[in-house]
Protein backbone atom coordinates (compact mmCIF):
# COMPACT_ATOMS: atom_id res chain seq x y z
CA UNK A 1 0.00 0.00 0.00
CA UNK A 2 1.50 3.35 -1.07
CA UNK A 3 0.81 6.10 1.43
CA UNK A 4 0.49 9.56 -0.10
CA UNK A 5 2.21 12.35 1.80
CA UNK A 6 -0.54 14.75 0.79
CA UNK A 7 -3.13 12.33 2.18
CA UNK A 8 -1.43 12.13 5.55
CA UNK A 9 -0.92 15.86 5.88
CA UNK A 10 -4.47 16.64 4.82
CA UNK A 11 -5.89 14.07 7.25
CA UNK A 12 -3.79 15.35 10.15
CA UNK A 13 -4.50 19.03 9.51
CA UNK A 14 -8.20 18.39 8.86
CA UNK A 15 -8.47 16.43 12.08
CA UNK A 16 -6.90 19.29 14.02
CA UNK A 17 -9.17 21.84 12.37
CA UNK A 18 -12.36 19.90 12.99
CA UNK A 19 -11.55 19.42 16.63
CA UNK A 20 -10.59 23.04 17.08
CA UNK A 21 -14.06 24.01 15.87
CA UNK A 22 -15.74 21.84 18.50
CA UNK A 23 -18.31 23.43 20.82
CA UNK A 24 -15.94 23.03 23.77
CA UNK A 25 -13.99 26.06 22.71
CA UNK A 26 -17.03 28.17 23.53
CA UNK A 27 -16.32 27.52 27.20
CA UNK A 28 -14.18 29.82 29.34
CA UNK A 29 -10.63 28.47 29.28
CA UNK A 30 -7.97 28.95 31.91
CA UNK A 31 -5.23 31.12 30.46
CA UNK A 32 -1.82 31.92 31.95
CA UNK A 33 0.72 34.37 30.53
CA UNK A 34 4.30 34.55 31.72
CA UNK A 35 7.51 36.42 30.93
CA UNK A 36 10.89 35.21 32.14
CA UNK A 37 14.05 37.29 31.79
CA UNK A 38 17.36 35.67 32.71
CA UNK A 39 21.01 36.71 32.68
CA UNK A 40 23.75 34.04 32.64
CA UNK A 41 27.52 34.14 32.68
CA UNK A 42 29.49 31.19 31.22
CA UNK A 43 33.26 30.80 31.24
CA UNK A 44 33.08 28.43 28.20
CA UNK A 45 30.02 29.38 26.21
CA UNK A 46 31.01 27.27 23.19
CA UNK A 47 31.86 24.24 25.34
CA UNK A 48 35.17 24.18 23.48
CA UNK A 49 38.20 22.10 24.47
CA UNK A 50 40.88 24.56 23.32
CA UNK A 51 39.20 27.97 22.91
CA UNK A 52 37.33 28.72 26.12
CA UNK A 53 35.38 31.89 25.31
CA UNK A 54 33.34 33.50 28.06
CA UNK A 55 30.12 35.44 27.54
CA UNK A 56 27.15 36.99 29.25
CA UNK A 57 23.89 35.53 27.92
CA UNK A 58 20.53 37.27 28.03
CA UNK A 59 17.47 35.04 27.74
CA UNK A 60 13.94 36.34 27.13
CA UNK A 61 11.24 33.70 27.42
CA UNK A 62 7.55 34.68 27.02
CA UNK A 63 4.98 31.89 27.35
CA UNK A 64 1.27 31.24 27.18
CA UNK A 65 -0.81 28.32 28.46
CA UNK A 66 -4.49 27.71 27.69
CA UNK A 67 -6.46 24.76 29.04
CA UNK A 68 -10.05 23.69 29.60
CA UNK A 69 -11.82 20.46 30.44
CA UNK A 70 -15.46 19.90 29.63
CA UNK A 71 -17.84 16.96 29.77
CA UNK A 72 -16.91 15.70 26.29
CA UNK A 73 -13.94 17.85 25.25
CA UNK A 74 -10.67 18.82 26.87
CA UNK A 75 -7.78 20.72 25.38
CA UNK A 76 -4.54 22.35 26.43
CA UNK A 77 -1.95 24.44 24.68
CA UNK A 78 1.41 25.61 25.91
CA UNK A 79 3.77 27.72 23.81
CA UNK A 80 6.93 29.56 24.74
CA UNK A 81 9.47 31.47 22.70
CA UNK A 82 13.12 31.47 23.71
CA UNK A 83 15.46 34.26 22.63
CA UNK A 84 19.17 34.17 23.55
CA UNK A 85 21.56 37.12 23.03
CA UNK A 86 25.35 36.73 23.61
CA UNK A 87 27.72 39.54 24.61
CA UNK A 88 30.51 37.68 22.79
CA UNK A 89 30.19 38.70 19.15
CA UNK A 90 31.53 35.33 17.96
CA UNK A 91 28.23 33.70 18.91
CA UNK A 92 25.02 34.38 17.04
CA UNK A 93 21.60 34.91 18.53
CA UNK A 94 19.50 31.81 19.10
CA UNK A 95 15.77 31.42 18.83
CA UNK A 96 13.73 28.41 19.89
CA UNK A 97 10.02 27.68 19.64
CA UNK A 98 8.40 25.15 21.97
CA UNK A 99 4.80 24.02 21.52
CA UNK A 100 2.69 21.30 23.06
CA UNK A 101 -0.95 21.41 21.95
CA UNK A 102 -3.57 18.70 22.07
CA UNK A 103 -7.34 18.38 22.03
CA UNK A 104 -9.57 15.38 22.77
CA UNK A 105 -13.27 14.99 22.11
CA UNK A 106 -15.48 12.08 23.18
CA UNK A 107 -18.67 11.00 21.40
CA UNK A 108 -21.32 8.27 21.69
CA UNK A 109 -21.19 7.93 25.49
CA UNK A 110 -17.39 8.12 25.53
CA UNK A 111 -16.94 5.08 23.28
CA UNK A 112 -15.36 7.14 20.50
CA UNK A 113 -12.54 9.60 21.09
CA UNK A 114 -11.12 12.01 18.51
CA UNK A 115 -7.67 13.47 19.12
CA UNK A 116 -5.33 15.96 17.49
CA UNK A 117 -1.96 17.20 18.67
CA UNK A 118 1.04 19.24 17.59
CA UNK A 119 4.53 19.50 19.07
CA UNK A 120 7.54 21.67 18.42
CA UNK A 121 10.59 20.77 20.48
CA UNK A 122 14.34 21.26 20.47
CA UNK A 123 16.93 18.59 21.19
CA UNK A 124 20.32 17.12 20.48
CA UNK A 125 20.29 14.88 17.41
CA UNK A 126 21.95 11.72 18.72
CA UNK A 127 21.84 9.96 22.07
CA UNK A 128 25.65 10.17 22.26
CA UNK A 129 25.59 13.98 22.04
CA UNK A 130 26.05 15.95 25.21
CA UNK A 131 22.73 17.06 26.70
CA UNK A 132 24.08 19.20 29.52
CA UNK A 133 24.27 22.51 27.65
CA UNK A 134 20.49 22.81 27.58
CA UNK A 135 20.58 24.90 24.41
CA UNK A 136 22.05 27.89 26.28
CA UNK A 137 25.70 26.99 25.75
CA UNK A 138 27.36 24.55 23.37
CA UNK A 139 25.88 23.72 19.99
CA UNK A 140 22.51 24.96 18.82
CA UNK A 141 19.78 22.36 19.14
CA UNK A 142 17.71 20.85 16.34
CA UNK A 143 14.07 21.87 16.07
CA UNK A 144 11.56 19.13 15.30
CA UNK A 145 7.91 19.56 14.34
CA UNK A 146 5.44 16.71 14.79
CA UNK A 147 1.68 16.80 14.37
CA UNK A 148 -1.11 14.33 13.81
CA UNK A 149 -4.70 13.29 14.36
CA UNK A 150 -6.40 10.07 15.30
CA UNK A 151 -9.54 8.30 16.43
CA UNK A 152 -10.17 5.45 18.85
CA UNK A 153 -13.11 3.26 19.80
CA UNK A 154 -13.52 1.48 23.12
CA UNK A 155 -16.60 -0.65 23.65
CA UNK A 156 -16.09 -1.21 27.35
CA UNK A 157 -16.80 -4.58 28.93
CA UNK A 158 -19.76 -6.12 27.11
CA UNK A 159 -21.33 -9.56 27.50
CA UNK A 160 -19.23 -11.23 24.82
CA UNK A 161 -16.36 -8.88 24.09
CA UNK A 162 -14.21 -5.94 25.12
CA UNK A 163 -12.93 -4.20 21.98
CA UNK A 164 -10.48 -1.36 21.42
CA UNK A 165 -9.58 0.15 18.03
CA UNK A 166 -7.38 3.12 17.18
CA UNK A 167 -5.82 4.73 14.12
CA UNK A 168 -3.69 7.82 13.60
CA UNK A 169 -1.74 9.73 10.96
CA UNK A 170 1.34 11.80 11.78
CA UNK A 171 4.04 13.99 10.24
CA UNK A 172 7.55 14.54 11.64
CA UNK A 173 10.27 16.83 10.30
CA UNK A 174 13.46 18.39 11.67
CA UNK A 175 15.06 21.64 10.56
CA UNK A 176 18.38 19.94 9.73
CA UNK A 177 16.68 17.76 7.06
CA UNK A 178 17.55 14.57 8.94
CA UNK A 179 13.87 13.62 9.10
CA UNK A 180 10.91 14.56 6.91
CA UNK A 181 8.36 11.77 6.86
CA UNK A 182 4.64 10.98 7.13
CA UNK A 183 3.23 7.79 8.57
CA UNK A 184 0.10 6.10 9.86
CA UNK A 185 -0.50 3.37 12.39
CA UNK A 186 -3.47 1.36 13.64
CA UNK A 187 -3.99 -0.88 16.68
CA UNK A 188 -6.69 -3.22 17.91
CA UNK A 189 -7.41 -5.33 21.00
CA UNK A 190 -10.22 -7.88 21.17
CA UNK A 191 -10.90 -9.75 24.44
CA UNK A 192 -13.64 -11.84 25.97
CA UNK A 193 -16.54 -10.11 27.71
CA UNK A 194 -18.18 -10.71 31.08
CA UNK A 195 -20.38 -13.65 30.09
CA UNK A 196 -17.88 -16.44 29.17
CA UNK A 197 -16.98 -18.48 32.28
CA UNK A 198 -14.98 -21.44 31.02
CA UNK A 199 -13.01 -19.91 28.17
CA UNK A 200 -11.22 -16.67 27.35
CA UNK A 201 -9.46 -15.09 24.42
CA UNK A 202 -7.37 -12.10 23.46
CA UNK A 203 -6.21 -10.80 20.08
CA UNK A 204 -4.00 -7.77 19.50
CA UNK A 205 -2.53 -6.21 16.39
CA UNK A 206 -0.51 -3.23 15.22
CA UNK A 207 0.33 -2.00 11.73
CA UNK A 208 2.60 0.86 10.68
CA UNK A 209 3.59 2.35 7.32
CA UNK A 210 5.38 5.51 6.23
CA UNK A 211 5.99 7.41 3.00
CA UNK A 212 9.52 5.96 2.66
CA UNK A 213 8.08 2.45 2.11
CA UNK A 214 9.01 1.28 5.62
CA UNK A 215 6.40 -0.84 7.37
CA UNK A 216 5.84 -3.18 10.30
CA UNK A 217 3.04 -5.50 11.41
CA UNK A 218 2.65 -7.37 14.69
CA UNK A 219 -0.22 -9.70 15.60
CA UNK A 220 -0.81 -11.92 18.64
CA UNK A 221 -3.71 -14.20 19.63
CA UNK A 222 -4.50 -16.48 22.57
CA UNK A 223 -7.47 -18.79 23.26
CA UNK A 224 -7.81 -20.54 26.61
CA UNK A 225 -10.06 -23.00 28.44
CA UNK A 226 -10.44 -22.88 32.23
CA UNK A 227 -10.46 -26.06 34.32
CA UNK A 228 -9.60 -27.10 37.88
CA UNK A 229 -10.56 -23.76 39.38
CA UNK A 230 -7.70 -21.29 38.88
CA UNK A 231 -5.89 -23.28 36.16
CA UNK A 232 -6.40 -23.11 32.40
CA UNK A 233 -4.78 -24.34 29.21
CA UNK A 234 -4.37 -22.17 26.14
CA UNK A 235 -3.03 -21.99 22.62
CA UNK A 236 -1.36 -18.91 21.16
CA UNK A 237 0.20 -17.62 17.94
CA UNK A 238 2.26 -14.59 16.92
CA UNK A 239 3.23 -13.03 13.57
CA UNK A 240 5.67 -10.16 13.03
CA UNK A 241 6.97 -8.52 9.86
CA UNK A 242 9.38 -5.60 9.54
CA UNK A 243 10.34 -4.10 6.19
CA UNK A 244 12.78 -1.28 5.49
CA UNK A 245 13.23 0.35 2.09
CA UNK A 246 16.03 -1.32 0.09
CA UNK A 247 17.45 -2.79 3.29
CA UNK A 248 15.88 -5.78 5.04
CA UNK A 249 12.73 -7.82 5.44
CA UNK A 250 12.31 -9.78 8.66
CA UNK A 251 9.29 -12.06 9.02
CA UNK A 252 8.78 -14.33 12.02
CA UNK A 253 5.86 -16.48 13.12
CA UNK A 254 5.37 -18.99 15.92
CA UNK A 255 2.61 -20.86 17.70
CA UNK A 256 2.44 -22.72 20.99
CA UNK A 257 0.45 -24.11 23.90
CA UNK A 258 0.69 -23.55 27.63
CA UNK A 259 -0.89 -23.46 31.05
CA UNK A 260 -2.01 -20.48 33.12
CA UNK A 261 -2.68 -19.91 36.83
CA UNK A 262 -4.89 -16.93 37.60
CA UNK A 263 -5.94 -15.72 41.04
CA UNK A 264 -7.26 -12.34 42.20
CA UNK A 265 -3.76 -10.87 42.70
CA UNK A 266 -1.62 -13.26 40.67
CA UNK A 267 -1.36 -14.47 37.08
CA UNK A 268 1.33 -16.76 35.62
CA UNK A 269 1.31 -18.14 32.06
CA UNK A 270 3.97 -20.49 30.65
CA UNK A 271 3.94 -21.76 27.04
CA UNK A 272 6.14 -23.79 24.71
CA UNK A 273 6.33 -22.20 21.25
CA UNK A 274 7.31 -23.68 17.90
CA UNK A 275 8.90 -21.35 15.37
CA UNK A 276 7.42 -21.69 11.88
CA UNK A 277 9.30 -18.85 10.17
CA UNK A 278 12.46 -17.02 11.24
CA UNK A 279 15.93 -17.76 12.55
CA UNK A 280 14.95 -18.36 16.18
CA UNK A 281 14.81 -21.80 17.75
CA UNK A 282 11.71 -23.14 19.53
CA UNK A 283 11.37 -21.39 22.89
CA UNK A 284 9.42 -21.17 26.17
CA UNK A 285 7.61 -17.92 26.94
CA UNK A 286 6.66 -16.68 30.41
CA UNK A 287 4.15 -13.96 31.33
CA UNK A 288 3.35 -13.00 34.94
CA UNK A 289 1.78 -10.27 37.03
CA UNK A 290 1.53 -9.93 40.81
CA UNK A 291 -0.22 -7.25 42.87
CA UNK A 292 -0.01 -8.25 46.55
CA UNK A 293 -1.17 -4.82 47.80
CA UNK A 294 -2.41 -1.54 46.34
CA UNK A 295 1.09 -0.14 46.93
CA UNK A 296 3.08 -2.90 45.24
CA UNK A 297 2.89 -4.35 41.74
CA UNK A 298 5.10 -6.54 39.56
CA UNK A 299 4.71 -7.58 35.93
CA UNK A 300 7.18 -9.29 33.60
CA UNK A 301 7.37 -11.36 30.45
CA UNK A 302 9.93 -13.22 28.37
CA UNK A 303 9.48 -14.14 24.72
CA UNK A 304 11.18 -14.08 21.29
CA UNK A 305 10.81 -11.48 18.58
CA UNK A 306 12.52 -10.96 15.21
CA UNK A 307 15.59 -9.48 16.94
CA UNK A 308 15.93 -12.40 19.40
CA UNK A 309 15.14 -12.71 23.10
CA UNK A 310 12.86 -10.02 24.54
CA UNK A 311 12.29 -9.12 28.20
CA UNK A 312 10.01 -6.66 29.97
CA UNK A 313 9.83 -5.87 33.70
CA UNK A 314 7.81 -3.37 35.74
CA UNK A 315 8.08 -3.14 39.53
CA UNK A 316 6.67 -0.35 41.71
CA UNK A 317 6.41 -0.01 45.46
CA UNK A 318 5.38 3.04 47.42
CA UNK A 319 4.82 4.01 51.02
CA UNK A 320 3.81 7.31 52.53
CA UNK A 321 7.42 8.56 52.26
CA UNK A 322 9.17 6.31 49.74
CA UNK A 323 8.53 5.61 46.03
CA UNK A 324 10.50 2.93 44.17
CA UNK A 325 10.30 2.08 40.48
CA UNK A 326 12.28 -0.50 38.48
CA UNK A 327 11.67 -1.01 34.75
CA UNK A 328 13.32 -2.91 31.95
CA UNK A 329 12.14 -2.51 28.35
CA UNK A 330 12.94 -4.16 25.04
CA UNK A 331 11.24 -1.95 22.47
CA UNK A 332 11.48 -1.16 18.78
CA UNK A 333 10.76 2.46 17.93
CA UNK A 334 8.89 3.12 14.73
CA UNK A 335 10.60 5.06 11.99
CA UNK A 336 11.10 8.80 12.59
CA UNK A 337 9.96 8.56 16.18
CA UNK A 338 11.77 9.36 19.38
CA UNK A 339 14.41 6.92 20.53
CA UNK A 340 15.25 6.01 24.11
CA UNK A 341 18.14 7.46 26.02
CA UNK A 342 18.09 8.58 29.62
CA UNK A 343 19.01 11.84 31.22
CA UNK A 344 18.12 13.16 34.63
CA UNK A 345 15.38 15.73 34.91
CA UNK A 346 12.62 17.07 37.08
CA UNK A 347 8.85 17.02 37.03
CA UNK A 348 6.68 19.51 38.90
CA UNK A 349 4.15 17.49 40.93
CA UNK A 350 1.54 18.21 43.60
CA UNK A 351 3.19 17.67 46.97
CA UNK A 352 2.96 14.02 48.03
CA UNK A 353 1.33 12.88 44.78
CA UNK A 354 2.20 9.42 43.45
CA UNK A 355 0.33 9.93 40.16
CA UNK A 356 2.70 10.94 37.34
CA UNK A 357 -0.25 12.05 35.19
CA UNK A 358 -0.73 15.03 37.53
CA UNK A 359 2.87 16.21 36.94
CA UNK A 360 4.39 18.28 34.14
CA UNK A 361 7.84 19.18 32.81
CA UNK A 362 8.87 22.69 33.95
CA UNK A 363 9.89 25.24 31.34
CA UNK A 364 13.03 25.97 33.35
CA UNK A 365 14.43 25.06 36.75
CA UNK A 366 14.98 28.78 37.26
CA UNK A 367 11.23 29.35 37.47
CA UNK A 368 9.80 29.35 41.01
CA UNK A 369 7.16 26.81 41.98
CA UNK A 370 3.54 27.51 42.65
CA UNK A 371 2.29 26.84 46.22
CA UNK A 372 1.46 23.17 46.83
CA UNK A 373 3.92 21.85 44.21
CA UNK A 374 7.34 20.23 44.46
CA UNK A 375 10.16 19.14 42.16
CA UNK A 376 10.51 15.37 41.72
CA UNK A 377 13.62 13.98 40.07
CA UNK A 378 13.08 11.32 37.39
CA UNK A 379 14.76 9.69 34.42
CA UNK A 380 13.74 11.50 31.22
CA UNK A 381 14.02 10.21 27.67
CA UNK A 382 16.16 12.29 25.38
CA UNK A 383 15.70 12.33 21.63
CA UNK A 384 17.33 10.27 18.89
CA UNK A 385 15.63 11.31 15.66
CA UNK A 386 16.04 8.98 12.70
CA UNK A 387 14.15 7.45 9.82
CA UNK A 388 15.57 4.07 10.83
CA UNK A 389 13.93 1.54 13.09
CA UNK A 390 15.80 1.32 16.40
CA UNK A 391 16.06 -1.44 18.98
CA UNK A 392 16.21 0.00 22.51
CA UNK A 393 17.00 -2.00 25.65
CA UNK A 394 16.59 0.15 28.72
CA UNK A 395 16.93 -0.48 32.47
CA UNK A 396 15.84 2.27 34.88
CA UNK A 397 15.65 2.41 38.66
CA UNK A 398 14.35 5.44 40.57
CA UNK A 399 13.83 5.89 44.31
CA UNK A 400 12.33 9.01 45.88
CA UNK A 401 12.20 9.62 49.64
CA UNK A 402 10.11 12.47 51.06
CA UNK A 403 10.23 13.64 54.67
CA UNK A 404 9.14 16.96 56.02
CA UNK A 405 10.16 19.66 53.57
CA UNK A 406 12.73 17.58 51.68
CA UNK A 407 12.59 15.08 48.83
CA UNK A 408 15.69 13.05 47.90
CA UNK A 409 15.68 11.21 44.58
CA UNK A 410 18.28 8.72 43.37
CA UNK A 411 18.36 6.93 40.04
CA UNK A 412 20.31 4.50 37.89
CA UNK A 413 19.98 3.85 34.14
CA UNK A 414 21.55 1.51 31.60
CA UNK A 415 20.60 1.78 27.93
CA UNK A 416 21.65 -0.11 24.81
CA UNK A 417 20.44 0.77 21.32
CA UNK A 418 21.21 0.05 17.69
CA UNK A 419 19.56 0.94 14.40
CA UNK A 420 18.02 -1.91 12.45
CA UNK A 421 19.00 -0.58 9.06
CA UNK A 422 20.56 -3.66 7.48
CA UNK A 423 20.19 -7.42 7.35
CA UNK A 424 23.24 -7.98 9.57
CA UNK A 425 22.05 -5.84 12.48
CA UNK A 426 22.45 -8.83 14.85
CA UNK A 427 26.24 -8.58 14.47
CA UNK A 428 26.33 -4.84 15.10
CA UNK A 429 27.47 -3.51 18.46
CA UNK A 430 25.12 -1.51 20.66
CA UNK A 431 25.48 2.15 21.49
CA UNK A 432 25.69 1.99 25.28
CA UNK A 433 24.82 4.46 28.01
CA UNK A 434 25.28 4.02 31.77
CA UNK A 435 24.62 6.58 34.46
CA UNK A 436 23.45 7.56 37.91
CA UNK A 437 21.60 10.56 39.33
CA UNK A 438 21.02 12.16 42.70
CA UNK A 439 18.82 15.12 43.59
CA UNK A 440 17.62 16.99 46.67
CA UNK A 441 14.61 19.33 46.70
CA UNK A 442 14.16 21.38 49.89
CA UNK A 443 11.16 23.55 50.67
CA UNK A 444 12.85 26.14 52.87
CA UNK A 445 9.71 28.14 53.50
CA UNK A 446 6.35 29.05 52.06
CA UNK A 447 7.98 31.23 49.41
CA UNK A 448 11.46 29.74 49.07
CA UNK A 449 12.74 26.42 47.78
CA UNK A 450 16.16 24.99 46.90
CA UNK A 451 17.16 22.18 44.49
CA UNK A 452 20.48 20.40 44.10
CA UNK A 453 21.10 17.73 41.47
CA UNK A 454 23.98 15.73 40.02
CA UNK A 455 24.34 13.46 36.99
CA UNK A 456 27.06 11.07 35.89
CA UNK A 457 26.75 9.50 32.42
CA UNK A 458 29.13 7.43 30.33
CA UNK A 459 28.45 6.58 26.68
CA UNK A 460 30.01 4.15 24.22
CA UNK A 461 29.18 4.78 20.56
CA UNK A 462 29.62 2.17 17.82
CA UNK A 463 31.44 3.56 14.77
CA UNK A 464 31.29 0.42 12.63
CA UNK A 465 35.04 -0.07 13.18
CA UNK A 466 37.02 -1.74 15.97
CA UNK A 467 37.45 1.71 17.57
CA UNK A 468 34.51 3.00 19.62
CA UNK A 469 33.96 6.51 20.94
CA UNK A 470 33.84 6.73 24.73
CA UNK A 471 32.60 9.78 26.63
CA UNK A 472 32.08 10.58 30.33
CA UNK A 473 29.84 13.41 31.52
CA UNK A 474 29.37 14.90 34.95
CA UNK A 475 27.11 17.81 35.83
CA UNK A 476 25.81 19.42 38.99
CA UNK A 477 23.32 22.21 39.42
CA UNK A 478 21.81 24.13 42.29
CA UNK A 479 18.91 26.56 42.11
CA UNK A 480 17.37 28.84 44.74
CA UNK A 481 13.82 30.06 43.97
CA UNK A 482 12.02 32.86 45.78
CA UNK A 483 8.43 33.98 45.34
CA UNK A 484 8.08 37.68 46.14
CA UNK A 485 4.39 38.17 45.32
CA UNK A 486 1.65 36.13 43.70
CA UNK A 487 2.81 37.37 40.31
CA UNK A 488 6.54 38.04 40.70
CA UNK A 489 9.25 35.43 41.38
CA UNK A 490 13.00 35.15 41.06
CA UNK A 491 15.79 32.57 41.02
CA UNK A 492 19.57 32.25 41.11
CA UNK A 493 21.44 29.20 39.83
CA UNK A 494 24.88 27.67 39.41
CA UNK A 495 25.82 24.88 36.96
CA UNK A 496 29.06 22.94 36.56
CA UNK A 497 29.60 20.74 33.49
CA UNK A 498 32.47 18.40 32.66
CA UNK A 499 32.81 16.14 29.60
CA UNK A 500 35.72 13.85 28.71
CA UNK A 501 35.46 12.24 25.26
CA UNK A 502 37.66 10.21 22.89
CA UNK A 503 36.29 12.25 19.99
CA UNK A 504 38.39 15.11 18.71
CA UNK A 505 37.69 18.46 20.43
CA UNK A 506 34.75 17.03 22.40
CA UNK A 507 36.12 17.42 25.96
CA UNK A 508 35.50 20.54 28.06
CA UNK A 509 34.50 22.02 31.39
CA UNK A 510 32.09 24.90 32.00
CA UNK A 511 30.93 26.97 34.95
CA UNK A 512 27.69 28.90 34.57
CA UNK A 513 25.84 31.21 36.94
CA UNK A 514 22.46 32.82 36.34
CA UNK A 515 19.75 35.03 37.75
CA UNK A 516 16.14 35.00 36.57
CA UNK A 517 12.93 36.92 37.12
CA UNK A 518 9.45 35.81 36.12
CA UNK A 519 6.19 37.71 35.93
CA UNK A 520 2.80 36.03 35.55
CA UNK A 521 -0.24 37.77 34.15
Image (tube, rainbow, N blue to C red):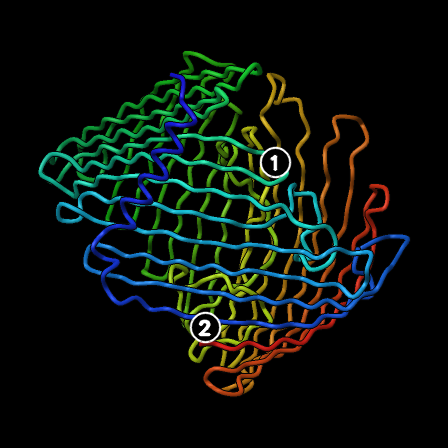
| Depth check, front residue: 485 or 234 | 485
- Residue under label 1, please give it: 417
Vertical order, 282 against 471 (above or below): above
At horizontal 69% and vertical 43% (from top left) the residue drawn is 128
Mark 1 vs mark 2: which is more N-terminal?
Answer: 2
At horizontal 45% and vertical 18% (from top left) the residue drawn is 282
Q: Secondary structure at mark 2?
A: loop
The alpha-carbon separation of the residues under discs 1 and 2 comes to 34 Å
- Residue under label 2, please give it: 321
At horizontal 30% and vertical 30% (from top left) the residue drawn is 204
Pair 1/2: label in front: 1
Image quadrant holding the C terminus, namely bottom left
Q: Position of residue 226 (x, y in %)?
A: 18, 32
| Depth check, front residue: 113 or 395 | 113
Quadrant of the image occupied by residue 239: top left
Task: For label 1, count other residues whose C-alpha is less than 10 Å away and answer few (under 14), some (14-19) or many (20+).
Answer: many
The numbered disc on residue 496 is none
| Depth check, front residue: 76 or 440 | 76
Horizontally, residue 433 falls left or right of residue 408, namely right
At horizontal 76% and vertical 70% (from top left) the residue drawn is 41
Image quadrant holding the N terminus, namely top left
Amino acid sequence: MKLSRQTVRFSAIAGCALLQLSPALQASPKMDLSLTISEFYSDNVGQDETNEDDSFITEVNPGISIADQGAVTDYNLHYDYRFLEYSNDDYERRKEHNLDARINRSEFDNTVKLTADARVFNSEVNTSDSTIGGGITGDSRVQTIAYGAGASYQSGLRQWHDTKLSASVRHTESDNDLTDIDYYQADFTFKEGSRPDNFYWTATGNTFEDTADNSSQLGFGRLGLRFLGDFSVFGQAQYEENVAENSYNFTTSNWGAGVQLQRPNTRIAVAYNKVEKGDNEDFTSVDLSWTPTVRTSLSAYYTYRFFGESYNLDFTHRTSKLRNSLTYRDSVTSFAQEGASSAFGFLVCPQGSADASSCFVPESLNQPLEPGFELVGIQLETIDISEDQTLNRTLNYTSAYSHGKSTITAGFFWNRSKRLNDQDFVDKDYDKELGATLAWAWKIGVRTDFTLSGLYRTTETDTGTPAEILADEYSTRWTLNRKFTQKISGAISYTFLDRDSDALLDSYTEHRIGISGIARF
